[in-house]
Structure formats: structure tokens, C-alpha cells
Image: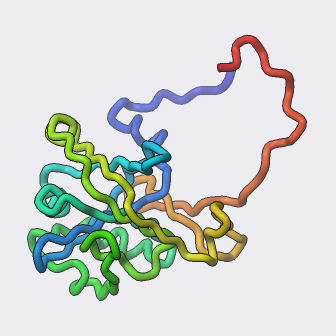
Amino acid sequence: MSERLPVPLEKAYRLMNHGPTVLVSSRHGEAVNVMAASWAMPLDFAPPKVAVVLDKSTLTRRMVEASGEFALMVPSRELARLTLEVGGTTGNEVDKFAAFGAGYWTGTQTGAPLLDGCLAWLECRLLPEPHIQDTYDLFLGQVVAAWADPAVFRDGHWHMEEGGKKSIHYVAGGHFFETGAAFEASAELPEPSNNAG
């Protein structure tokens, strides 16, 4: 039997919450905002869709609901401090881009600001689902444009070399880790069992 440590249920999310941290940006009228989010994921291939959790208290959520669009961006270690700053500050009180000196460019398919220095950028149009938005704070978007830093993503794959830029993964309490070394599973796989599936 494997060794096991009980995990308090209020901390159980941390067992799976180590996908790449993302930054979520939005624009409504002349106002722009950015926040950090750890709960985001792809949903579909064609057309590509994503999901992200946006708490009711956030300015970003109100701006996404008003504008019908947002962007998801993948930061690297170089942006970890900025990620914590924009994640720990409310846009209700401060212009985060100005306060933290964050440069950005505007998307081609949406008005969402795309933060300089990220590894990837996805422009999204909101797929309105009022029930899940109100009940679960879950927002769905269709990806309408996407870019990546060619130093880390090319030919449809991540290439995060040793010593190069890597995505960061938030694990609570101000702690991150970077994506580790890539590896491939052996080409000599065992015969599938009747229980595989």
C-alpha cells in the first residue's frame, strides 16, 4: 500500500491546482484591468474554448460581463512578482497597468490588453452561460486569436529548455514552481489490461 497523508478538504484544491497560472485581462470602454487566476483550462479543440473562474468581487469579472471578451496570458518566472501584485490588488482601487508599470498591446480580435513578456496570449469572446457564471463563477470563452513566444512554443509544441523561460504554477502562499524538464514515456508500453480505461 502506498504511504498516504490526509489532506484537509479546504486544501484539497491544492492537489490539482498546479496547472499554469494565467493572467486574465479585460477592457470596457477606456478602462483596462488584469488579474491573476490559477483556475483556468482548455475545453475544446474546434472551435477552441477555455474556462476560467472569475470571482464575483473582481473588477475583471464585471468588465468581462460588460464587454463580452477577455484574454488569458501565460506568464513566466520573470513576471512572477507582477503576477502576485496584480493578483493581490483590486482594480476597483488602482489602475494596475500604471501602478505596476506593466506594458501591453491590444489584441487584434478583441480590445483586451495583452501583457508584454508573457509566453502565450489567447484572445477570447465570452460564451455567456449565466447559470454557471452566477452559481460557480465559471466563465467560458471561445478563443478567437492566439500567439506564443517562439523561444518557447513552435511547431505546435512547448519547448521549454533548461535555463530558458518556463510557465509558472501557483501553489498558494506566494509560492510558485516552474515547469520542469520535459521527458517522453517509453515507446515500449506494456500490453493494455482489461482495466485500462
State left or right for residue 188 relative to residue 101: right
Q: Is residue 101 above or below residue 22?
A: below
Q: Residue at x 57, y 63 (%)?
A: 178
Q: Position of residue 148 (x, y in %)?
A: 52, 71
Q: Nearer the viewer, residue 177 or 167?
A: 167
Picture mark count: 0
- Figure coloring: rainbow
Q: Residue furthest top?
A: 194
**Residue 73 percent location from the top left of the image:** 41, 66
Q: In the shown orientation, is residue 152 left or right of residue 19?
A: right
Q: Position of residue 184 (x, y in %)?
A: 78, 49
Q: Quadrant of the C terminus?
A: top right
Q: Position of residue 60 (x, y in %)?
A: 19, 62
Which residue sits at x=45%, y=53%?
171
Indicate left or right for 194 with 125 as reference: right
**Nearest the camera: 145 or 42?**
145
Res 83 quadrant in image: bottom left
Q: Nearer the viewer, residue 187 or 142?
A: 142
**Displayed quadrant of residue 10:** top left
Horizontal side, residue 166 vs residue 133: left or right: right
Which quadrant of the figure contains the N terminus?
top right
Establish if 95 lies above or below 127: below
For this orientation, the residue located farthest to the right is 188
Which residue is at a point 67% across and 24% down the rendered structure image?
Answer: 2
Residue, x 46% and y 80% (percent of image)?
117
